[in-house]
Image (cartoon, helix red, strand yellow):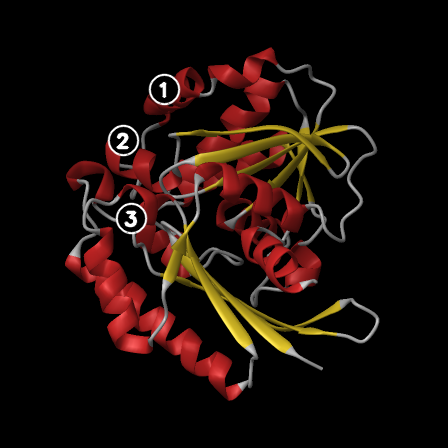
Amino acid sequence: MKRYAVIDIGTTSTKLHVAEKMENGNWRRIVDRAEITLLGEGLHATGEIQPAAALRTVAAISGMVEESSRLQVQDLVAVGTMACRTATNFEYFALRVAAACGVKIRVLSGEEESRLSYLGATSGIPVANGPMIVFDIGGGSTEFVRGTNATILESFSVNVGAMRFTETYQLRNAVSPERLPDILGAIAVDLRKLERFPASHALLGIGGTVTTMASVLHTLETYDPDAVHGTRIDGTEVDRQIELYRSRSAEERRSIPGLQPGRAEVILGGACIVRSILTALRATNLTVSDRGLRHGVLLDRFSS
């Protein structure tokens, strides 16, 4: 049986997914992990990938390529998203990656990213037979895809990201409760595009913010994708977690069960975006999918 690998180079994290194609056409997970590399750190302010961020991410990609080689994968593809699309010095970063491990990064357009994320997110999870919105909160932007079952009706990107708002509103550490309305209000302005959709849409969230929130809900000492996949998070839980993060510094957040230490600085910004999405769509809850872009790339590239 053949094995394939996908490396997803995001603004906040870099992810590796290795899967084996079974004789019946199904896929068996071999490795599915993420490293918090913060490639987009400082990108919003400078327009460039910063040297330390590049160093972290190149090291992570190189390690994932080596791991894939040990696992004897037949083919590997690396894709880049928002940070790679927008950084003015992306070519320099790409050359460093190629020099370190021989991998060429395929930069996805926003439309491609949305389509592949929807394909991955909706695989293997029964959410609803009807209209659905899939959202993926990244470090620099949030991608939205509206569809019905397997049919995509529209997709778009909004420049609302966990790292972007963390840096703009200084959310790395404790925030006074008086500041929250202004922060949520600023996010709401950028998400006004969602208000035109009827409240009948099911909501499916993917990406590190919502999978982390599911992990915190379950108080997972070790991340368990099977426990996270399909988790339902309601508005009350979102508000509870915002308060949990708002009242603590990044260092104090690292002791919260289920929270990856590397995500402690950006989780408050991400949780505020989740709350604003629920509010804009007049939704009471969302379902979490552990699957996402990397799974969609795998299905799209290697299923035939």
Among the 4 quarters of the image, the one containing residue 240? top right
Q: Is residue 9 left or right of residue 289?
A: left
Q: Is residue 191 left or right of residue 121?
A: left
Seen from the viewer's position, the closer of residues 84 and 235 is 84
- Disc 1 designates what residue? 186
Answer with mark 3 or mark 1, whichever residue precedes in sequence.
Answer: 3
Mark 2–mark 3 Cα distance, whole angstroms, equals 16 Å
Answer with mark 1 or mark 2, whichever residue precedes in sequence.
Answer: 2
Q: Nearer the viewer, mark 2 or mark 3?
A: 3
Element at badge 1?
helix
Please, what is the three-letter code of the amino acid marked with disc 1? Ala
Mark 1–mark 2 Cα distance, whole angstroms, equals 10 Å
- Disc 2 designates what residue? 169
Element at badge 3?
loop
Say whether marks 1 and 2 touch (CB < 8 Å): yes
Q: Nearer the viewer, mark 3 or mark 1?
A: 3
Q: Is residue 284 left or right of residue 293?
A: right
Residue at position x 78%, y 66% from top?
A: 26
Residue 271 shows up from this direction: no
Q: Residue 91: where, in percent of width, then height?
A: 23, 55
Identify whether 109 is placed above or below 90: above
Q: Is residue 39 left or right of residue 106?
A: left
Please, what is the three-letter code of the amino acid marked with disc 2? Tyr
Answer with mark 2 or mark 3, whichever residue precedes in sequence.
Answer: 3
- Disc 3 designates what residue? 40
Residue at position x 49%, y 46% from top?
A: 209
